[in-house]
Image (cartoon, rainbow, N blue to C red):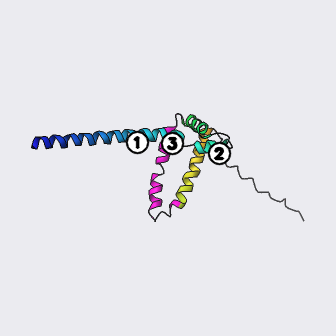
Amino acid sequence: MAASIFSASTGMGILAVLLFIAYFVLLVFTVMRGLHYVFTQYVMFDSGNSLHGKEAAEKSEQLMQGHRGEYFVFALSFLGWIILGSIPLGIGLLWVIPYMQISLVIFYEKLKGVPEVTKQPKPEPVTEPEHAE
């Protein structure tokens, strides 16, 4: 009797481990696949809403080709800011979320090939000529 109980619990343990592995693999696959479609809304906005959802998703997928890892690291870099912003009852997120959104737009424009805005040198102050009296 004891041997049959032990084998049943071992079988359940193996099943639990296999289900956990399958869940983890599916989670990784879903996240990696979802990274292709991060910029779909930006592509639709840039096209003047002339693209349909599927076309915008395909264009976003082309844009992210070869840049998923770069984006993943980019998104992970905000994890500390999110945790810090959540500590004071989430009030810090009022600053973190807009910062993340602006950074995301800059990342999108970099991928799209939009040149960066550079600071113009400050013009020299105009001095009035001295009057001889």
Tag nearer the camera, 2 or 3: 2
Q: What secondary structure is marked by label 1?
A: helix
Residue at (48%, 43%) from the top-left corner? Answer: 72
Mark 1 vs mark 3, foreground winner is: 1
Identify which amino acid the numbered label 3 is placed on: Tyr
Dominant secondary structure (helix, strand or loop) of the stretch shown in magenta: helix
Residue 124: in magenta span = no
Q: Amino acid at mark 2?
A: Phe
> Is the residue 127 above or below the residue 15 in the image?
below
Residue drawn at point x = 42 percent, y = 38 percent = 29
Q: Quadrant of the C terminus?
A: bottom right
Residue carrying label 1: 27
Mark 2 vs mark 1, CA separation in Å: 29 Å
The reply to whether discs 1 and 3 touch (Cβ–Cβ < 8 Å) is: no
Where residue 49 sits, quadrant-wise, is top right
Residue 45 disc label: 2
Of the numbered discs 2 and 3, the one sitting upstream in the chain is 2
Q: Earlier in the sequence, mark 1 or mark 3?
A: 1
Is any atom of residue 9 visible in this view?
yes
Q: Quick one: SS at disc 2?
A: helix
Q: Which residue is mark 3?
A: 71
| Magenta residue check for 91 | yes
Residue 82 higher or lower than 70, as above or below: below
Q: CA distance from mark 2 to mark 3?
A: 20 Å
Q: Position of residue 4 (x, y in %)?
A: 13, 41
Q: Which residues are magenta?
A: 65-93
